[in-house]
Image (tube, rainbow, N blue to C red):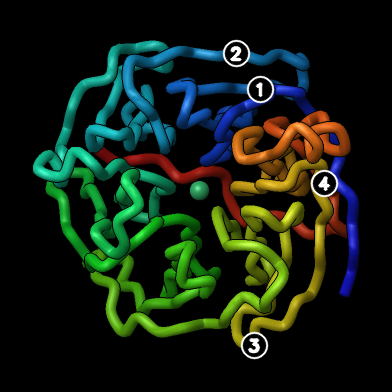
Amino acid sequence: MHEWKSDLVLDAKCRLGEGPAWFGGHLWWVDILQKQVHTYDPAKVAHTVRDHNQAVTVVVPRASGGLAYATENGFFVSDSENGELVPVADPEFDRPQNRFNDGKCDSAGRLWAGTMPTNGEKETGAFYSLSPDKTVTKHFGGVSCSNGLAWSGDNRTLYYIDTPTRRVDKLDYDAQTGAITNRREAFAIPDGLGYPDGMTIDADGFLWVAMWGGGAVYCFAPDTGAIVGKVSVGAKNVTSCTWGGSDLSDLYITTARDNTSDEELRDLPHAGGIFVARVNGKRGAYEARAFGG
Ligand code: CA
């Protein structure tokens, strides 16, 4: 197993930094609990924060310009980067105890995101996609904490994490129709590593899984679950990761400051920050994909 260290990029002190996405030469992410969207431009060493009146959990580019979002109140779009959020669909308007969580777009411009109960219930969330024509499809329910997702390089498999299961699952994926079928376990997370949270895939097909409570991102071989590598992070609660930089070889990592004790914070003063690692020529295959609608 390879082991790498990550470096602090930005001491953002996010309570719940999440959802990193690289597009337009910037890293984008959200702080769900502070209802913020952040950007960081490494070329200019410039950080921006935009406050919202609701918890934003996903931010992705929009093919027509502007951005698309998942929030605690459903799917939204804006016409420009600082434009107002316009509601598109709220598939769980009847479940106010739920909110959206992690999500990203597929190669056909659909925005995929799942939900989670915030009141300690189990298996009352679901996994959805929003098509460019703005129709919503519910793919499955029974979700407790919908989290990381990634498509294989051949675009025929979707990897998916519902955190409390401590598994990475896989489904057959049809890019043309947007159907996902045959959900089964790809591999289980070994004991002691923490809880699987956000995830990305590299150009060689390996999965990079952020570990809540685990202080690291682990790289897994998707067919066997073998641990190929570990990136240590200066935070206990590591939430997600994505490839960025001009050649997509910088692994950007988001973290949370909440759920870290004062004693732990003495050793991990930058918890809630953004970290980056370069990992032996590994790189991503593409920038964050855009919502097509
Ligand atoms: Ca997450």
- Asked where in the image residue 201 lies, by quadrant, the reply is bottom right
Alpha-carbon span between mark 2 and mark 3: 40 Å
Q: Is mark 2 within 8 Å of ligand 1?
A: no
Taking the spot 33% from the left edge, 22% from the top edge, the residue there is 54
Decide which of 269, 291 is in the foreground and name it.
Answer: 269
Between disc 1 and disc 3, whose residue precedes? 1
Q: Quadrant of the N terminus?
A: bottom right
Element on which disc 1 rests: strand
Q: Is residue 209 visible?
A: yes
Q: Is residue 113 above or below residue 185?
A: above
- Asked where in the image residue 13 lies, by quadrant, the reply is top right
Q: Which mark is residue 224?
A: 3
Q: Which residue lies furthest to the bottom in this view?
A: 224
Taking the spot 56% from the left edge, 22% from the top edge, the residue there is 38
- Asked where in the image residue 57 lies, by quadrant, the reply is top left
Q: Is mark 4 within 8 Å of ligand 1?
A: no
Mark 1 is surrounded, within 10 Å at the Cα level, by few (under 14), some (14 to 19) or many (20 or more) other residues, namely many
Element on which disc 4 rests: strand
Residue 60 location in percent, x, y? 43, 36
Q: Is the C-beta separation of discs 2 and 1 under 8 Å?
A: yes
Alpha-carbon span between mark 2 and mark 1: 7 Å
